[in-house]
Amino acid sequence: MTKNLDENVDTSQLTDGFHLIVDALKLNGISTIYNVPGIPITDLGRIAQREGLRVISFRHEQHAGYAASIAGFLTQKPGIALTVSAPGFLNGLTALANATTNCFPMILISGSSEREIVDLQQGDYEEMDQLAIAKPLCKAAFRVLHVEDIGIGIARAIRAACSGRPGGVYLDFPAQLLGQVMDKTAGAESLVEVIDPAPAQIPSADAVKRALDVLKSAQKPLLILGKGAAYAQEDALIKTFVEKSGLPYLPMSMAKGLLPDDHAQSAAAARSLVLQEADVVMLVGARLNWLLSHGKGKAWGDAPKQFIHIDIDPGEMDSNRAITAPLVGDIGSCLNALSDEMGKDWQQPPAEWRTRIADKKQGNLEKMASKLKSNAVPMDYHGALGALREVIKDNPEIILVNEGANTLDFARSIIDIYQPRHRLDVGTWGVMGIGQGAAIAAAIETGKQVLAVEGDSAFGFSGMEIETICRYDLPVCVVVFNNSGIYRGTDTNPAGSDVAPTVFVKDSRYELMMQAFGGVGIYATSPDDLNRAVREAIASGKPTLINAIIDEAAGTESGRIGNLNPQSIVMQQASKGKKS
Ligand code: ADP
Ligand code: TPW
Ligand code: MG
């Protein structure tokens, strides 16, 4: 029963909302909260810290939210972001929606104002109907009004975040709830330990047989591994399946490293060829969304194709193309079932197909190798990334975070990743601003060294969080690819004295920002400088920011997705005029 505190009550026998929330999180194995404090949740962070949770305070809720979502991706436990009401909640919402879009389990916990006042719109402190606003942006949203329901509320949130297709969940805790008290023993009994939060989903025997029949019929099979496969943590099974089957595979960007990128069966360096020519494509934890051109059009060529699709969400089937063999279930169960059925009569894909891919790969890799040796100053993307590629090759346990446009697209194809979940990036939305949040979560959750390679624009979205990196003394090295702008630093304004919309202050000294908070700041103009500076950062483990000066003219509009960028006829004529 809920009690109001009066002087005669023995408080040692009581607990309150704050404590029960912390106890419920701990009971469910949650060890870290990513937060920005304030009314009404300041004491929640304090109590959590006192009770042994790690409470990481950010400078802006969006980055606490991105950190929580990446924690969810890395650990399969929902990452917890904690924010104050209305404005803090709204700041966290972008990250919650992004987590849902990317299928990362996360819970945004927000304090909220008094229900009675909010619902009558009487103008409470930070008044907002948060539950209603969060609902369309997440997988599930719950509000807890009574202290004895905290255990159930948190259990429902965890289950919703982790089961089936993972996603973001909103949990609304009104200020009044936090201070409500109840009997300690009854409180402890009200908590719920979630048993088996992501139950196995076993595919039907028919579906397995159908998939295998289609796969066996292929002359030019192709496997595509997505970040769902990285999330599933079935690393050994995936490696065995790929190697036993002999299938050529393409890793989506955050699936890089599931098998080392230099694996003989990787077809990444022959991407266009395999997409165009494959006759059977098996998707594993990857959606046929814009990142795969919806499975249609020029990128996929004219050759007729059949699709096999492994996904935990039945609704994903036929979303863009007809799926000949839907295999609905969790990746572990599906691949185990397929492996069992493949048996001894499995034939490796035709040698002709494998040779064709290998030849194409070799040609493309050779072409790239010479560009990576570029020592040009100012650096171009190949020269700078060629240096970073070598650093990661020598230190494959480093986690790479990557955002930007050109900085993202070039790094994705140039920097090889050797271990699962060691590349974190802008994900399904191509969102700028995940950089520091992702780097912080990666360092906190894994204890590993992080290298964050970010365009100067991308960096700016979460730049203030380098103070957070310094405050917790995290082994994060941020490399800002400084080309003085978005895509390029060369745009001009023909009509006035303002700079062009894509251009920043020239010669910006980003490294001084890191020095301001006690970290190491380095100015690097050549690939050699960059190589040396990153290796020093790794050796010291100190928070470091390297301002890497990139040729302002080296990038292209929108990086490699310029085709998605509608261009005005006037601008097209203007740029033609410039070139001629
Ligand atoms: P990518 O961007 O790498 O192509 P997506 O985010 O588009 O990857 O796709 C990930 C897919 O993985 C989602 O459709 C999601 O439902 C699915 N998924 C997530 N976890 C699992 C799992 N354990 N088993 C099967 N499918 C999963
Ligand atoms: C939340 C639009 C896509 S890429 C980009 C922006 C602003 C920055 C590109 O410049 P950067 O990289 O980072 O300097 P480079 O190497 O090409 O110069 N707001 C959000 N997300 C997106 N995607 C944008 C804006 C965008
Ligand atoms: Mg830039």
Image: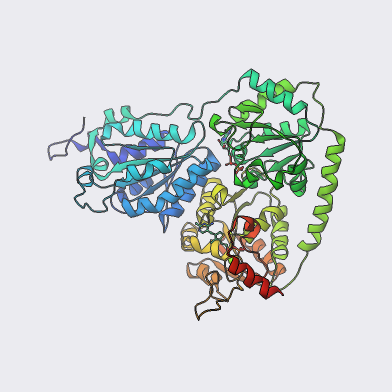
| Residue 451 position by quadrant | bottom right
The one nearer the camera, 291 or 504, is 291
Q: Is residue 391 left or right of residue 453?
A: right
Residue 498 vertical placement versus 572 (above, below):
below
Q: Is residue 523 left or right of residue 344?
A: left
Tell me the quarter of the image containing the C terminus. Answer: bottom right
Residue 168 makes an appearance in the image:
yes
| Residue 74 position by quadrant | top right
The one nearer the camera, 364 or 37, is 364
Colour pattern of the rendering: rainbow
In the displayed orientation, state which residue is furthest to the bottom.
497
Measuring from the top left, give residue 308's x and y in whole percent.
67, 31
In the displayed orientation, state which residue is furthest to the top.
205
Residue 405 vertical placement versus 578 (above, below):
above
Residue 546 makes an appearance in the image:
no
Q: Is residue 573 left or right of residue 212?
A: left
The one nearer the camera, 319 or 385, is 319
Measuring from the top left, give residue 66's x and y in whole percent.
48, 50
Measuring from the top left, give residue 333's x and y in whole percent.
62, 26
Instruction: Give the residue drawn at x 25%, y 40%.
Output: 177
Tell me the quarter of the image containing the N terminus. Answer: top left
| Residue 16 position by quadrant | top left
Instruction: Give the residue drawn at x 69%, y 61%.
Output: 385
Figure label count = 0
Residue 391 vertical placement versus 211 (above, below):
below
Q: Is residue 141 left or right of residue 253?
A: left
Measuring from the top left, give residue 125's x and y in whole percent.
23, 53
Residue 577 vertical placement versus 309 (above, below):
below
Ligand 3 resides in the quarter of the picture at bottom right
